[in-house]
Amino acid sequence: MGKRWFGRLGGSSGYVAAAILGPLVAACGGATPAPPPDPASAKAGPAPAAKATKAEATKAQAPSTARVPSRSMLDLLRRAELLPSPDAASTKSALASLPEGGKGDVRENYRAVAPATVIIRTPTGLGTGVIVGPTGWILTNNHVVDSGEREDFRIKVSVELGKLDKSGAMERTNKPITAWVHKADPMRDLAIIKLEGNHKDLPFIRPAAKDPAPGEPVASLGHAGSGLVWAIKDGEVAAVGKLATHLSQLVSLECSGSESAGDDACPKRKQEMFEGLKKVLEHDKPLMVVQSTCPNWPGDSGGPLVNRGNELVGLNSFGYGNSENRATFHVHVSEIRTFLSEIPVQPADVLPDPWFDGGEEATIEDADLDGRYDVLRTEGRAAMARFYDLDQSTIGDGAGKPDVGALYGKRGFDAEVIYLATRDGSFAWYDTDDDGRYDVVLHDERGSGRVTHGYRIGKNGKLGKDDALGSGGPMIQPDLVVQSAERNALARLGSITLGASMVESRGGEPAENLPSPLLGGGREVAIEDMDGDGRTDTLVTRSVYSHGFVFDVDQGTLGEVHKNDAAQALLEKQAVDAEATMIAQGPRLWVYYDRNDDGKFDFLTYTSRAGTGVALEAYRLGEGGRKEPAPEHVGRKMLRPRLLENGTLAARLGRVAVRAIPSATSAIADDGLDSFPDPLRHGGIYFSFGDTSRWSTGFGPKTGWDKAVIVSAGMTSTSLVVDVNKDSPAPGKLSAQEVITGGKFKPEFAFLHRDGAEWTYYDTDQDGRFDLVLFTGSPSTGLAERAYRIDANGAATMDPSLAGGKMVRPSVFTKKPTQAQFKKVAGELFQARSLE
């Protein structure tokens, strides 16, 4: 998974501050996903006929990212490209040029099998097929036909037959016939197609009733080579077994080529690539294969492998190696018999399979941060998929992280909604009534995130277009789900994992649940000693959709923990006795406190705009999830150590926080004025006096305040400080920033804007200390939502009498001359809606 918790926010202190608050200003997965540029894994496969069965809860630990089977992974495995389609005039027939020492009568094989072998053309190339029914049923590889022409979700290809001439060579008919795909299995790499028109008595090959054995003589046919078609290769069965058992050999062959010469990491890299596939093959379909000494090449795919009785014992699939060291693999006849046991009468609606086409890297996530897994997420170079378990029924409460590869191999994630994006468009499947069967699929054929067509899925798997579903709305439509709780869950999860633009608006924000204080930041753990005393006091946590900190400042649980695995085990059990935790997800930030150190979190600050650094909501927490608003903490920094009632623990949290959290978000010095952002430090990194060019005509020289106003600016912040009495020392040649950092500037007023929130600061009695702060989270109103007085001891208390008044108020100054001076300059600086 991506290390999304690295970044930087101006004004941060310490490396961990960059780790968590860099990404806070950008939503986790907030943008509409654009499929990556490689189309290799964006090809059609079977649609999911029914939902996955529920998986048993497991406490097995798994790597952060599990390798799972995908089309792109199997494309790497099955190096069986189609032969680039030659012009018809250049395609020659191959004579039965066979070795004199052939085992058995290979010429008889050719005469019997070649007429039942056909050429299959798609817009991208040429492959092979074998007739298995006299009325025009043809067996081939899925990878041969999946690039065929499409009409809605049906696939058609062009087929050309041939016949033996008097010389014993095959002769092309030059009469292409359209054939439609009736069934496809991308995992087995099999497809059955049917010729259009009335056909009977076509030559065909029967699948063998007896499985092939090593050493048995065989021959394969196909259309590979320099424009040659119907070429036969003589050989024998080299091995028979499960594909999973051959992976290590394939890795060795893959790394033996000249392109890997000198690459010591190649075997390890390829082994890792196929390890996930091997695990899934062991859990899912066995995928029996035949390895032969018949050298197959691009163009032979889909051709027959036959025994001396002219029976089909395999189907050409892929090969590895060069002409001197070539391993050729064929789909085993047992797989063919199973595949042909049921053949649909009508052409199939071939949709991609999200379990197979969504990419090869999978993680399981708790996207809504409530401590229970709800999203299975896959990513690849050319595709991505999201599986939503809306009722969170797959993994039980208290269960650890499951083995994602095993879960995926069993298709054991109980998703009510699945979203799949590929370069060729995107799809969303819905089990609208949660009965275990997907009954709606939405299709976005342009990759725009908007529905172009909607379909109802019948119990027989057939699609019926429903114009009411093709509304042009977003692909994630919660109102398609019947149950109210699941609708709300889909609205939340879709917005978190795909971005709000991908989710149909339901009026207002999705209902929010409080995150789990310990697990909400993720279950990937790194231990830290933030205060440098040699003992662990902090867990840095992360997941794909969140990141955070767990602070055990009294080190009662983590003090003697020295390994990440041990810390992770404690976290999974929620057995860490933390005094505070911080959780970040996109622009949202939560901080939990156990103020009285009784082992229960009893206070929460929250912001939906982490760039402000302050709480936009605050609550006292009670039993059963009860929340009591705490308005006196709104507009103040998110992490405030002195909220802990134990002074020693508060001091320790301050020492930890100074290294972990930016000063714009944490109040270290005190819980009074320092609980608000500092207009001198947190307005930005660019400073200027009021006589710069932007102010010269509208402000500076006009009023004579040129050195009494200092402006700072950042990407999402601005501040303005004013020496109303103009009693600061003359700056001389000092820059505005040097004046600020020198500590000799004496402002009586300051204004700060950060990420859509604003503060005004007043030194009302001109004693050199700000003693009044007004705050608003809605600057467009120009009105203060909160007012705080800072007393002589540094304590901040609310002043309700000033709430609802203007943000810029000359009358709060105690001295009339200061009021008059400030009224004059305020008129130059602020819009009328903010002025008293």
Image (tube, helix red, strand yellow):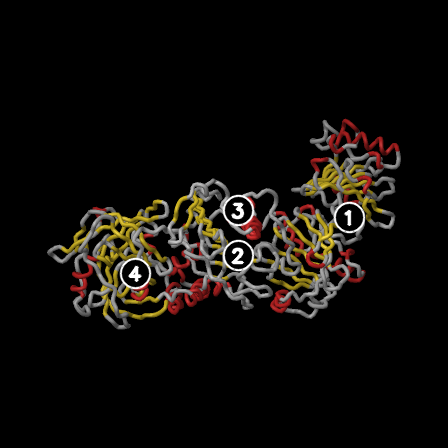
Which label's residue is closer to the chain start, 3 or 4? Answer: 4
Between the residue at mark 2 and the residue at mark 1, the CA separation in whole angstroms equals: 39 Å
Marks 3/2: CA–CA distance: 16 Å
Secondary structure category for the residue under label 1: helix
Give the residue at mark 2.
389
Label 4 sits on residue: 340
Quadrant of image for the N terminus: bottom right
Q: For mark 1, what is the residue?
A: 632
Tell me whether circle 1 and circle 4 mark residues in contact (CB < 8 Å): no
Marked residue nearer the N-terminal end (2 or 1): 2
The residue to which callout 3 is attached is 479
Asked which secondary structure carries label 3, the reply is helix
Question: For the residues marked 3 and 1, what is the alpha-carbon distance in whole angstroms?
Answer: 38 Å
Tell me the amino acid under the disc marked 1.
Answer: Glu
Q: Position of residue 656 (x, y in %)?
A: 72, 59
Mark nearer the N terminus (4 vs 2) = 4
The mark lying in front, picked from 1 and 4, is 4
Indicate the secondary structure of the residue bearing disc 2. Answer: loop
- What is the C-alpha distance between the residues marked 3 and 4? 40 Å
| Amino acid marked by disc 2 | Asp
Q: Give the SS element for disc 4.
A: helix
Q: Are marks 3 and 2 in contact (CB under 8 Å)?
A: no
Sequence-wise, the earlier of marks 3 and 1 is: 3
- Label 1 or label 4, whichever comes before in sequence order: 4
Which label's residue is closer to the chain start, 3 or 2?
A: 2
Please give the count of numbered marks on the rendered protein.
4
Q: Position of residue 680 (x, y in %)?
A: 76, 43
Alpha carbons under labels 1 and 4: distance apart: 72 Å
